[in-house]
Image: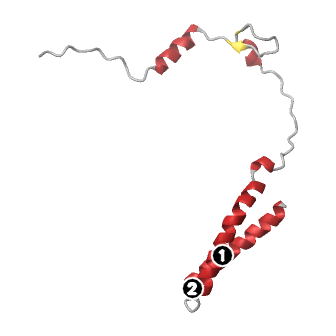
Amino acid sequence: MKRILTTLASVLGLWILVSFTGVIADGARPEFWTTSLMWSLLAGLVIAPFYAFVSSQMFADEPTAPVVETEETEDAADVPAFHSGGSDDAPPTRALNLDEIDEMERARKLWPQQKEEAVSA
């Protein structure tokens, strides 16, 4: 089905290209080329949703990739973790130290704090 619609879309694109070229280049028969261009564009509007539906990623064949088993890195053992009270199957979460928390708070400030100056009237 996908090959049929791809072939049909290619033929339709060629028809649109030839009709457009005919409208531009052949001034002796403008009615023929204009009608041809109109019908080719209309056919393209009818076929385009079907072609988009068939060629979408949702229906594409999934590539088969080999599954690679990875070992835990040495850095993962150095990260402190705490038990969050959830299920035992849940992965441990990393605890933040106070320096990281202070750095995150400083990063949240968009503008430096400015001292309010009293305006004398």
Quadrant including the C terminus: top left
- Comes first in the chain, label 2 or label 1: 2
Residue appearing at x 31%, y 17% in the figure = 114
Please indicate, yes or no, whether residue 55 appears anywhere in the rendered image: no
**On screen, residue 6 above or below 67:** below
The quadrant where residue 31 appears: bottom right
Kindly identify which numbered label has been placed on residue 39. 1
Q: How far across and how far down the image is residue 70, in percent? A: 83, 27
Describe the element under mark 2 as helix, strand or loop.
helix
The quadrant where residue 96 appears: top right
Q: Which amino acid does label 2 sit on?
A: Ala
Mark 2 burial class by Cα count in 10 Å: few <14, some 14-19, many 20+? few
Kindly identify which numbered label has been placed on residue 115. none
The figure's colour scheme reads secondary structure
The quadrant where residue 119 appears: top left
Residue appearing at x 67%, y 74% in the figure = 40
Q: What residue type is labelled 1?
A: Trp
Residue appearing at x 26%, y 15% in the figure = 116
Looking at this view, is 97 or 33 the one in front?
A: 33
Looking at this view, is 71 or 108 the one in front?
A: 108
Q: Is residue 77 left or right of residue 111?
A: right
Q: Nearer the viewer, mark 2 or mark 1?
A: 1
Q: In this view, does 71 lie to the left or right of 39?
A: right
Please indicate, yes or no, whether residue 18 appears anywhere in the rendered image: yes
Quadrant including the N terminus: bottom right
Mark 1 burial class by Cα count in 10 Å: few <14, some 14-19, many 20+? some
Looking at this view, is 90 or 41 the one in front?
A: 41
Q: How far across and how far down the image is residue 32, in percent? A: 62, 86
Determine the CA span between mark 2 and mark 1: 18 Å
Q: How far across and how far down the image is residue 25, in percent? A: 57, 85
**On screen, residue 18 above or below 66:** below
- The residue wearing badge 2 is 25
